[in-house]
Each structure stands twice: as C-alpha cells, then as structure tokens.
Amino acid sequence: MWVLLGVIAIIATFINLYRYLAGKDYKLAMAMGLSFTALTLCAEYSLVSDWVEVEDWAALMDVVPGMERALWFLTIVSILLNIAPILLERKGKK
C-alpha cells in the first residue's frame, strides 16, 4: 500500500509543478502531494507495526535501517518540491 501511496504522491507533486509552470492554480495539487506523502509515511509505519506484532525481527533488521534514510530523504524532497511554487511566487513579487 505504501508503494501505491508513494507513487500517487510523486504524481501529485509533478502535477503541482506542471500547473505552477503553466500558470494555473496549483494549490490543490500541492495539498494532495503533501497529503499523500503523509499517508505514505503512515502506511510504512503500519507495515513496520505489523512486523513488530508478529515478531518478524528479521524483516525489521533488514528493511528498517535503509527505509528510515530513504523516507527522511524522500519526505524532505517532497516538501521542498511541493512548496517550491509558493517560494518562487514570493521571490517573484519582491
């Protein structure tokens, strides 16, 4: 599930950037991109929680260390890309 939500977050982010570059209202796409990023993180946390409940320590030791770094990086990139149009608008007004 987290993969599907992550792909939707990426698509929404690119729609956000495209709508900004096209001069259209991009705020709904921005909200969708950030929302699906949050849902992706929740789905990943849920997956890890399931592994803890069934005591699948091998899966936790194998996946969690690498996913932690990837999720931090991708979340920061998602936030920056989704708020970039707002920052560019503010820069253009000055």
Image (cartoon, helix red, strand yellow):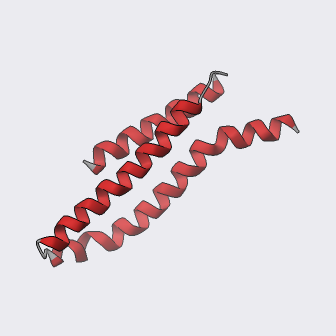
Which sits in the foreground, 50 or 8?
50
Q: Residue 54, position in %: x, y?
A: 11, 71
Does residue 15 sit above or below 94 in this rendering?
Answer: above
Residue at 57%, 43% in the rendered image: 82
For residue 45, side relative to residue 11 (left or right)? left
Task: Decide if residue 57 is on the left or right side of residue 34.
Answer: left
Residue 86 locus on image (x, y percent): 69, 39
Residue at 30 percent across and 71 percent down: it is 64
**Residue at image x 54%, y 57%?**
76
Dividing the picture into quarters, in which one does residue 90 lie? top right
The image position of residue 7, as x and y in percent, is 36, 41
Tell me residue 45's x, y (percent): 31, 62
Quarter-of-image position of residue 50:
bottom left
Residue at image position (37%, 49%) is 39
Residue located farthest toward the right when viewing the structure as drawn: 94
Work out which quarter of the rendered image holds the C terminus and state it.
top right
Pick the front one: 37 or 64: 37
Position of 55 relative to 80 (above/below): below
Label count reads 0
Residue 68 versus residue 39 in the image, above or below: below
Left or right: 40, with 93 as reference point: left
Residue 9, located in which quarter of the rendered image?
top left
